[in-house]
Image (tube, rainbow, N blue to C red):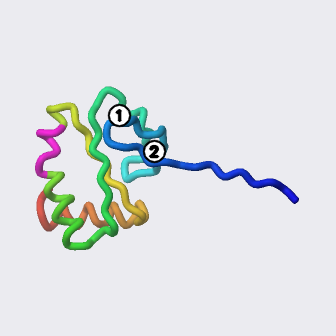
Amino acid sequence: MEQQTTERVRLPRIGEAAPPFEAETTFGTIRLEDFRGSWLILFSHPADFTPVCTTEFVAFAEIHDDLRKLGVELMGLSIDSTYAHIAWVRNIEEKFGV
């Protein structure tokens, strides 16, 4: 019988460094290291096109320029497809102008 090993993964806590990662986004492939030297707000939402998520997304869009002036970048995380994200962003741009 083969012996299995289980790797335990622990989420970082506030103040701890996040583990390196790479992800496909609406802007192409990004890596956590791309944001080195900046603060990064990583926020998640359960689904595109939902009212609460849309409201939060619009709120972030409205303060994005101010955050960038402070050296802060934004990254949203969701399980929806890249195509759904693009459609949602276009919908938000049309309805809210951000």
What quarter of the picture does the C terminus occupy? bottom left
The amino acid type of the residue labelled 1 equals Phe
Residue drawn 21% across the image and 66% down it: 54
Residue drawn 31% across the image and 68% down it: 48
Magenta stretch: includes residue 61: no
**Between disc 2 and disc 1, whose residue precedes?**
2
Query: Secondary structure beneath disc 2?
Result: strand
Residue 29 image label: 2
Q: Which residue is mark 1?
A: 35
Q: Report the side of 63 relative to 24 (left or right).
A: left
Q: Which residues are magenta?
A: 62-67
Residue 11 image label: none
Q: Report the side of 73 relative to 1 (left or right).
A: left
Residue 9 or 98: which is nearer the viewer?
Answer: 9
Magenta stretch prevailing secondary structure: helix
Relative vertical location of residue 12 with respect to residue 2 in this rendering, above or below:
above
Residue at the outermost top position: 37
Residue density around tag 1, few if under 14, some if 14–19, many if 20 or more, within 10 Å: some
Q: Position of residue 91 (x, y in %)?
A: 23, 67
Q: Residue 82, located in which quarter of the rendered image?
A: bottom left
Q: Report the side of 23 relative to 93 (left or right).
A: right
Residue density around tag 2, few if under 14, some if 14–19, many if 20 or more, within 10 Å: few
Choose mark 2 or mark 1, whichever is in front. 1
Residue drawn 40% across the image and 66% down it: 80
Residue drawn 49% across the image and 48% down it: 10
Q: Position of residue 28 (x, y in %)?
A: 42, 47
How far apart marks 2 and 1 lie (CA) works out to 13 Å
What quarter of the picture does the N terminus occupy? bottom right
Q: Position of residue 32 (x, y in %)?
A: 42, 38
The amino acid type of the residue labelled 2 equals Thr
Residue at the outermost right position: 1
